[in-house]
Amino acid sequence: MNQQIVLSNWKFKACDEEEWRQAKVPGTVHTDLLRHGIINDPFYGVNEHELQWIDKKDWEYEATIRLSESWVGMGQLELVFEGLDTYADVYVNGQPILFADNMFRAWRVDVKDYVHAGDNQVRVVFHSPITRDQGSLHKLGMEMPAPNDQSQLGGLEDHKLSVFARKAPYHYGWDWGPRFVTCGIWREVRLEGWSAPKITELYICQNQITAQVADLTAEIEIHSPVDWTGRLQVSSNGTVWAREVTLISGSQVIKLDMQISKPDLWWCRGLGQPSMYTFKAELLEQDRLMSAKQVKTGLRTIRLVRERDQAGASFYFELNGIPVFAKGANHIPNDSFIPEITNERYRHEIATAAASHMNMLRVWGGGFYEEDLFYELCDEYGLLVWQDFMFACSMYPGDESFLHNISMEAEYNIRRLRNHPCIALWCGNNEIDSAWAQYIEESGWGWKQHYDRNQREKLWTSYEALFHRILPETVSRLAHNIAYWPSSPLRSLSRDENQHANTLSGEGDIHYWGVWHSVEPFDNYNRYIGRFMSEYGFQSFPELKSVLSYAPEEQLELESDVMLAHQKNSSGNRLIKEYVEQYLPDPKDFKSFLYMSQILQAQAIKTAIEAHRRNKPYCMGTLYWQMNDCWPVASWAGMDYYGRWKALQYEVQRSYRDIILSVLEAPEGEIAIYAVNDLRDQISARLRLQLFDFYGRVLYENDEAVALEPDSSVQIKSMARESLLQSSDPQQVVLSIRLEREHELLASNLFYFAGFRDIELSQPLITICEVPGTNGTSFTLESDSLARQVWLSAQEEGIFSDNFFDLIPGVPITVQFYRRSNQERPFIEGVPGHVTVMSMADFI
């Protein structure tokens, strides 16, 4: 049988120092230094600026592994490094066995000739990626575009080095993240030994999947140290498929065809259950088990549908023959120091996405190919994954060794992830096609203008080799049933001026940043709508508790050193302030500004999501930027670094429900009410309208029957503003819109006839009462006058079933508290401890 030993008891030091210290593996140099008290908390204050020396040094790690005679007598011994970050020389007993140069892949080395019985030393020397790639830059002879590389903070002036290392780009800084160019052993190290045949990979190729039959092929990769004859079998749910096999010494792939009748299909959230199958492959010699490997997968067909139509060309995902309106967000790494991300933090994020009614996450190309657990959780919760390759907002080298490195990286990660039913798309890169804009001289981000004709040709030739040849060919060869999309955003792979993304082109996917970067009004979300909105976003600060984790009280000021250090977008704080002044009442102090920034962010993204969903099926996807944070910071995230839900996350939870109501007011004063139904069932319900004044008096009421077709968006009512208001003051009334079926509330929304800034709020008296029989976990809130954006803050970590909502007098709202848990259920009904209740009137 196969055996393995996980290497532990590592120690580390700087190569130019003598003292060894205990290391944590998996880990990073930065976190090891922090544990030993050599550096201060990298996330606190402006400490980031003081720690840029770490990436200029070489570091080494060392461990000893004791082996018995039986171990060294095995037919095959391999040392496996699941992750080395990034440039590393590896020695066993003083002998060089490996030079690693890619963070994104595992490394396996035959060490049988290098080990002996007794103690064996494994030493890993990490070379500074900064020092090494300064040489790469000098050899190339020209700077490469990489605007998010914070080289000046790193003491490198404008020399962008991130493009040369196959390392997480965000480690060099981004407009939401710090610059910590890490190194270290970031995934497990183990020694594997075997003398009999070993199954090294099991892939369940899904040839054709229908509700009647699943036509599958098990592709089993086997390494055998010797020639061997025996039985290979694959089993699942009590069914066994088997054959006799003859192996020769070395590696080979055996294929076994399989069929499953009436399979339970895997569905994304909202369409059905994410059913999974476990397949186990075994090698047997006269009923003696020699090797086994097990994988879980879901049976499904996933297709990117791009078909010509009157508006241009569609862009949507079809799952098991059903069109999916994608609702989700862009995911970035959960920490600057990847090994610090616990299983609980992963589950909290994915459970948050599911609780927010999402069905897709995009793993963005400036981070890393996520841990296995991330994809396992997406499989479990029914979340599709748009998977970028790790390239973002930069041009890259095209020399032979670099392209070969990418080819190995792509092959490793496609093989690693291809059994996951959640994988819906492989995308070549983030924003590079639109940034370079090869076919339109005056378009793009101004990169081309810095290069002469020969340099341009060289850079674009490298781009095409990477994103139009190597990556699509690798996807097609190893995961042929998953679509490849060269760049996001992209209009079409036309190799002419029609290739690059255009917000009004009617095809491809769109990143719309007019709101935010260009300071366009929120209403422009209703104008610029593409076939698939794969990026858009708006910033806010985290809540005060999170801000105080990185800033002392005396730094709580918008332009303080710490606030600027924790705002990586150069115009970010100014933009938030400018938008607040345009849309919201003036906050009374900086702490109130934190709250107002969250309300602003939530209202912006609510406007966008509703616009995208109203325009279904023209638009078939909305993925806002961004789901999460890698450190405590002002950013576009809906959930901060500590997993605390901002106002945005609660707004997303409402806006992504399967059925929503949306109100759009035309410039001429016509108020249109839309209903969006993502369910596959027709809905018969009652539309109930009530016009309230701010003290709860009903000024107008209407109730009528409506029918919603399956998978539809339709205008269900239209009214003239003046006829609805009559003599009411538009600054003192609110329209409540509810869709009800018998006693069930299907959807609701509120419409105000004046903006936040134009409404004068009185100080409401809000009461909160425990619901009898709930043991302190559920509460009902009421108010004597309109209370806007009521914020419930709990002593315990967790979430409420609803938050940041408006309270109309006479219309109570009941909420449930769910505490954060380390168990498989990340949200468990619990007691919140002391609850603070505030509304917008408390902050102005």
Image (tube, grey):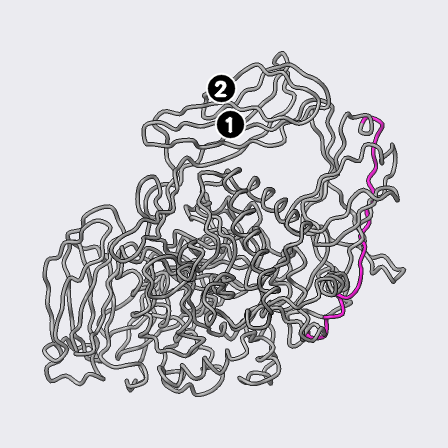
Q: Are marks 1 and 2 in contact (CB under 8 Å)?
A: yes
* Quarter occupied by the C terminus: bottom left
Tell which residue pokes out farthest to the front in this image.
Answer: 453
Looking at this view, is 76 or 43 the one in front?
76
Image quadrant assignment for residue 706: bottom left
Which SS class for mark 2?
strand
Determine whether, in the image, residue 588 is placed left or right of residue 615: right
Residue 503 in the image, given as x and y percentages of width and height: 36, 66
Q: Which residues are magenta?
A: 47-70
Residue receiving disc 1 = 218
Residue pictured at 30% horizontal, 43% vertical? 322
**Looking at the rendered structure, which numbered label has been put on residue 241?**
2
Residue type at mark 1 is Ala
Mark 1 or mark 2: name the one nearer the start of the chain: 1
Q: Is residue 406 visible?
A: yes
Where 42 falls versus 560 (above or below)?
above
Looking at this view, is 460 or 466 the one in front?
460
Determine whether, in the image, residue 691 is placed left or right of residue 1: left
Answer few, some or many: residues within 10 Å of disc 2's Cα (few below 14, many 20 plus, some between 14 and 19).
some
